[in-house]
Amino acid sequence: MALKIAERGIIPPFIVMDVMRAANERAASGKDVLHLEVGQPSTSAPKAVIEAAKQALDTDLLGYTDALGVPPLRERLTAYYQDYYDLSLPMDRIIITTGSSGAFMLSFLAVFDQGDKVGLASPSYPAYKNILRALGVETVDIPVGPETAFQPTAAILADLDVQLDGLIVASPSNPTGSMLTAEALEEIVQWCDATGVRLISDEIYHGITYGRKASTALAYGDNAIIINSFSKYFSMTGWRLGWMIVPENLIRAAECLAQNIFISPPTLSQLATISVFDCFEELDANVARYAENRALLLQALPKAGLDQLAPSDGAFYVYADVTRFTNDSQVFCQKVLAETGVAITPGVDFDTERGSQFVRFSYAGATADMAAAADRLGEFLAN
């Protein structure tokens, strides 16, 4: 007799991981690959973090920590919010998590029940929808496009024909890299407060912006849940460490969930990460490289025929309309990888309805790789 598989596990794959696996298989066969598919910095963690980790391995037992995270790291984050955003924030509201993924899981469990409705922009990061679906929460796609810089607005939200229980926004966004203006974000925060909608603000690409600084929802009220990560700007993807900022009345619920699901965030990562706040010169040099890569692609892609691009205001992505060349972005990406060795991600990962018309390029890698990829794509699209 076949044993049951729970319905919560029957969710769509995270397609970018499938693309990365195909790219790695190509590389293992001896063929070259240029990785523009995954949103991962090609730089290691800052040197001071690595040295702190070595020291911790020699001197610390690396046992469990408090479920909310070690106080020295949380204290450094309060100082960071004061310095970077000019916001005074009590340490009690900061929870260290196992990556931003752990923060999303804790926040979803803390504020949404089965059957609740949560709105999210389409296109958006696919794990939002897939995690919520696994938890029995209904997602409401909010189609957005060039007319609003691929971001939701308070006016769009007010016109929805469904009562939301929650809303997720991301600025800068994955996959588009587009950002909400400070005014637009404030209007969304005010709309959520006025209508009783729980706002979750994904701010994991803060620090990686071009031309203007990203605003935090924390500046406009205390009801939103803020989620951030040490993976992107801080260049520490594999260390699996993030944080969340919650309203005071959610602290205990989030703590109890964290105790039972995760026990504590990774101890070694926490102890080492305290040093990352002394590394801004190194981190900003990474952003300068992303800016160079961005400029290269924004010049090269239109020359190759990909001239319908989302605003790449932040993060390290270009989201491109490929309908001039294909109506099936997944097949298109497979063909590009097979014929050029350039790995890119189909838009169906981020938008189930219109994603077949788009692809995402990640420019987090080396500038030489971006230049080589642009040349190969130009030749491929010209034929």
Image (cartoon, helix red, strand yellow):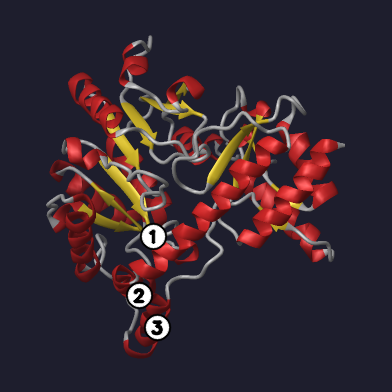
Q: Could you say where residue 310 lies in the image, as x and y percent from the top left?
A: 53, 32
* Helix, strand or loop for disc 2: helix
In this orientation, which residue lies closer to the viewer: 121 or 177?
A: 177
Mark 3 = which residue? Answer: 51
Q: Does residue 189 appear to the left or right of 368 in the view shown?
A: left
Q: Could you say where residue 200 lies in the image, as x and y percent from the top left?
A: 31, 37
Identify which amino acid the numbered label 2 is placed on.
Ala
Mark 1 = which residue? Answer: 230
Q: How far apart are marks 2 and 1 (CA)?
A: 12 Å
* Helix, strand or loop for disc 3: helix
Q: Is residue 14 visible?
A: no
* Helix, strand or loop for disc 1: loop
Mark closer to the chain start, 3 or 2 = 3
Local packing at callout 2 (Cα closer than 10 Å; few below 14, some 14-19, many 20+) is: many
- Taking 328 as reference, is 42 above or below it? below
Res 30 → quadrant:
bottom right
Residue, x 36% and y 81% (percent of image)?
A: 52
Mark 2 = which residue? Answer: 272
Total number of numbered discs in the rendering: 3
